[in-house]
Image (cartoon, rainbow, N blue to C red):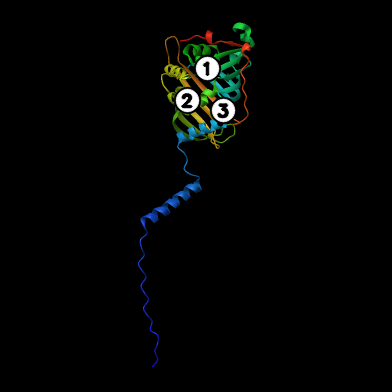
Amino acid sequence: MNLRPTSLPSAAPAPARPPRAGAVAGVLLAVVLGLLAACGGAPPDPVSAVRGAVDKTYAAGTARASFSSATGPPGTPGTPVTGDGVVDLVGGRADTTLAVPLLGGGTRVLLAGGVLYAQVPPTLALLVPGGRPWASVPLDRLSTGAVAASLAQFGGTPTDPLQQIDALHGVVEARAVGPEPIDGTPTTHYAGIVDLLATPAAADPARRPAVDRQVAEIGTNRVPVDVWVDDQGLVRRTVQTVTAPDRPGRPATATTVTVTLSEHGLPVTVTPPPPDQVTDLGAFLPVR
């Protein structure tokens, strides 16, 4: 009798196990991380982007700066002051040349140790006591209302590019406006608000009185600011406008200051003039 091999019925496939929740979460996390890596990561929020750019700009230490200031009644072009030079952001020093309309040609201005040193133009030589070639004044005295008003009538307010960049530490609000080139360099434009009471100057007992005076003059501690940040994460330009309302004996004024930075990290040395070549004008300035 022939015995044929009997085919055994094949076993039914085991039912598939549902994936564990942990495994699913792991897969989703891997996908999300992969997408973020492919996209270069999520962009920072605008406030963090601006603050990060300020920190990176200070880490670079120095830069070439060009700047302009215009002061006058709100809604008018104002009296212009322009300048350019180099700045040491960390050391608080600058070596610049200003062009003030009523003074004619360029005037060299140094900033060092909280003091402004200005070469005396020939047109003012007879007005400076002592006949020395340089005049100096502490920067905090320049923020008083009486001095600011006198300088505005004389031909423009002095521009301190260090102060404008330092104030960006106090950015508390920002929004991205969009890409805009600065002198051919791609940048992102941000519009924001600086809280003057959140700046390093406000935290410095030596500089806080000047901040308080400015807040009192303009009636607010919140100042609008525009900032342009390049692809390297460095500040390339900032524009701030401050408006002081009408006060008894003084009309309303608006001051717009623009500072443009380039060549971050270049070597900068600023040396104040010898004391015997300087007349200290601080004692002669009016106070409020």
Query: Which sits earlier in the primary sequence, circle 3 or circle 2?
Result: 2
In the image, residue 46 lies at what x, y percent? Answer: 46, 35
In the image, residue 57 lies at what x, y percent? Answer: 54, 31
**What's the amino acid at mark 3?**
Thr
Q: Residue at x 53, y 9 (%)?
A: 283
Labels 1, 3: front one: 1
The residue tagged 3 is 260
Q: Residues within 10 Å of mark 3 (few under 14, many from 20)?
A: many
The residue tagged 1 is 139
Q: Residue at x 49, y 34 (%)?
A: 52
Q: Which mark is residue 107?
A: none
Element at label 2: helix
Q: CA distance from mark 3 to mark 2?
A: 21 Å
Q: CA distance from mark 2 to mark 1?
A: 15 Å
Image side of residue 18 versus residue 41, left or right: left
In the image, residue 75 lies at what x, y percent? Answer: 48, 19
The residue tagged 2 is 200
